[in-house]
Amino acid sequence: MSDYGSDNTCCFRCTQFVLTAGLTALFIWLSLRTAKPSCSLEKFYLPALNIADNSNTTRSNHTLSFQLNLNNKMKDKGVRYDDIKLSFYYGTNTSFPIGSYTVPGFYQGHEKKAHKKGMLVTSKLPWDAALEKVSNGSNVIFRVDVATRVRYKVIFWYSKRHNLTVENKTVEVDGSGKSSAQQLHCYLMAFGFPLIVLFNLILLL
């Protein structure tokens, strides 16, 4: 009779342990799961394509300016960015690179937005052909690639680095030399660290 009671107690404790371990692991996963930052590109401007200003100063101004916006929507996790590299191309492929710009790495707190302005002097851009397009009412298409690595801060520690990329995003510029705000789709090219932590914790339990 005592053996039967001991068996029941053992089964109860095993069941309790499994349920507790499972609920703990689920709680930890829900606490540690991450979401990639959202990003957008605005204030994309090439003065030399502004047909309203025909001055020599404007036509010889071969700069490209922009603003990269990054939004960390997570309520309790920060994001540490490595240097962010933006590559610009004339057209939709990589055959005509016109320049690049690097945003220095930085830390972004939870529920914070960052606005990073940049400017570069373009090279090898066929200005005459581009100006002819916008003068005829057409838009000039540019390609933008963005690449960086991020780490997520959870309480006092950071996750491993994850590749965050935007590839083949096209931006259309009209006769004002400007483009409307563009939403960029960031891709997190890594296996989510919360699941790795979860598996390790299950093994430990």
Image (cartoon, grey):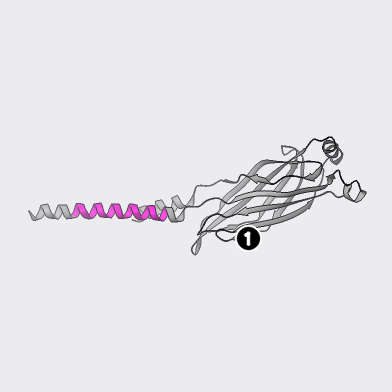
In percent of the image, x 55 and y 56: which residue is there? Answer: 151
What residue range appears in magenta?
10-29
Q: Is 132 above or below relative to 10? A: above
Q: Residue at x 71, y 47 (%)?
A: 87
203 vs 14, left or right, is: right
List x then y, in percent, for residue 3: 10, 54
Residue that label 1 marks: 106
Task: Indicate yes or no whether the magenta region holds residue 188.
Answer: no
For disc 1, the neighbor class at 10 Å (few under 14, some 14 to 19, many from 20) is: few
Q: Position of residue 119 (x, y in %)?
A: 77, 54
Task: Give the residue type that dot 1 points to.
Answer: Phe
| Residue at image coords 15%, 52% | 7
Q: Nearer the viewer, residue 118 or 151?
A: 118
Which x, y percent locates residue 106?
63, 60
- Comparing 81 with 51, the one in front is 51
Note whether 127 is above or below 107 in the view shown: above
Q: Position of residue 193 (x, y in %)?
A: 48, 52
Q: How many marks?
A: 1
Question: Quarter holding the C terminus?
Answer: bottom left
| Furthest residue toward right | 56
Q: Quadrant of residue 92?
A: top right
Above-or-below relation of 113 to 132: below
Q: Main secondary structure of the magenta part?
A: helix
